[in-house]
Image (cartoon, rainbow, N blue to C red):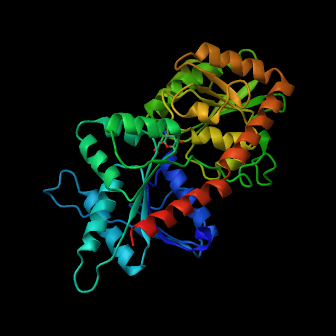
Amino acid sequence: MAEDRKFRIGITCYPTYGGSGVVATELGIELANRGHDIHFISYSQPIRLIEDHPHIHFHEVEVSQYPLFQYPPYDLALATRMAEVAQIYDLDLLHVHYAIPHSVSALLARQMLANARNGGKRNLPFVTTLHGTDITLIGLDRSYLPITRFSIEQSDGVTAISDYLKERTVKEFDVQNEINVIPNFVNCDLYSRNNKHADDRSRYAEPNERILVHLSNFRPVKRVCDVVEIFDRVQKKVPARLMMIGDGPDRANAEYLVRKKGLQKRVHFLGKTDNVENKLAICDLLLMPSELESFGLAALEAMACKVPTISTNVGGVPELIEHGKSGMLADVGDVETMAKYAIDLLSDEKALRTMGESARFKAQSDFCATKIIAKYEALYARVLARSL
Ligand code: GMT
């Protein structure tokens, strides 16, 4: 059986706070737990890669500076490191997360090794996983579109995290090769309401207060000021606190708005924290009013902890959240409706807990790590069989 075969895989991702890096890191950990050898290749250690693991290795990409380089060529240094690591550790394939520039670097590494001298020639197929803004935002920029399309088409396997993203990729990029939809996943043992390591709730709220949470990289696409606007309306009707987890360019705007509204004592900015599962397990509701989400990993992680999400009805979110059952959906910018949904739910314990149960059920039945990792393993086996 394909799943019994153990692979040696090079994984490249953005190591910072962001959905694609989180998915890549969690994938590497899950694969390593199944006995595959995982080599992360990036400019720094991925943030969720906290513990030592006998099957996980990290290779840092050093980018040399030179006065002539206004823009040091990371993509070239990455390609070189990918090829080196592949040769030294006898990698079977590369799996890159976020097309730009990782798939271009992987393509170069594959070509370098196909033409290597002194007996160093080898096949190094690569799989590209599309996550979202690499297609919907940055990839559409004219300076990146042609090369992004080229590197996707040159990939030996392509995955997208939702049907929505697959359709957008075909529509905007007109790519001709097959795109496999493999959604985001969650480890339902780790992300659970019964988490023994859950934070002490009394650190953040009084017993009579609800805890709302937002988890993101605070980029403009997340509309973090809408989170504050929604929370402001909620806390006028229901005693509540807000946990803001993560960091990024719009954090200062959100902090300013919180001060302007006099909400400092009710809103906790926690920054980039480890072990978000310990925090989600004590929350009541997640707010995700994004402009766009190709999937919405934060919502899935919350759902596994029986925390329903109030989100915008965008991108791949409806593939995850069924309105009225496992969460609530509204139009982008409609903070009044999102606040109303939150107030109604938080004021009705039974409805809140029923929705939490449905959310957990959906996370477990459709997006549990055990099911989704097997899809990646099967894809690796197909890619390797084709590239022999
Ligand atoms: O915008 C982010 O949250 C970061 C971005 C990324 O690529 O780092 O996230 C995208 O990938 C996540 C993991 O696959 C998805 O769950 C997010 O929905 C997606 N974000 C967007 O499409 C805006």
How many marks the image carries: the answer is 0
Tell me where residue 26 appears, x and y as whole percent: 58, 57
Residue 155 figure quarter: bottom left
| Residue ID at (25%, 70%) | 112
| Residue ID at (27%, 73%) | 114
148 or 69: which is nearer to us? 148
Can the viewer see residue 183 in this picture? Answer: yes
Tell me where residue 221 appears, x and y as whole percent: 46, 31
The C terminus lies in quadrant: bottom left
Can the viewer see residue 63 in this picture? Answer: no
| Residue ID at (47%, 62%) | 45
Residue 342 figure quarter: top right
| Residue ID at (63%, 36%) | 320
> What residue occupies the far bottom of the structure in this picture?
118
Relative placement, left or right, of 109 versus 349 is left
Residue 237 figure quarter: top right
> What residue occupies the far right of the structure in this picture?
350
Relative placement, left or right, of 272 versus 341 is left
Tell me where residue 108 appears, x and y as whole percent: 27, 63
Relative placement, left or right, of 304 versus 349 is left
Relative placement, left or right, of 131 versus 142 is right
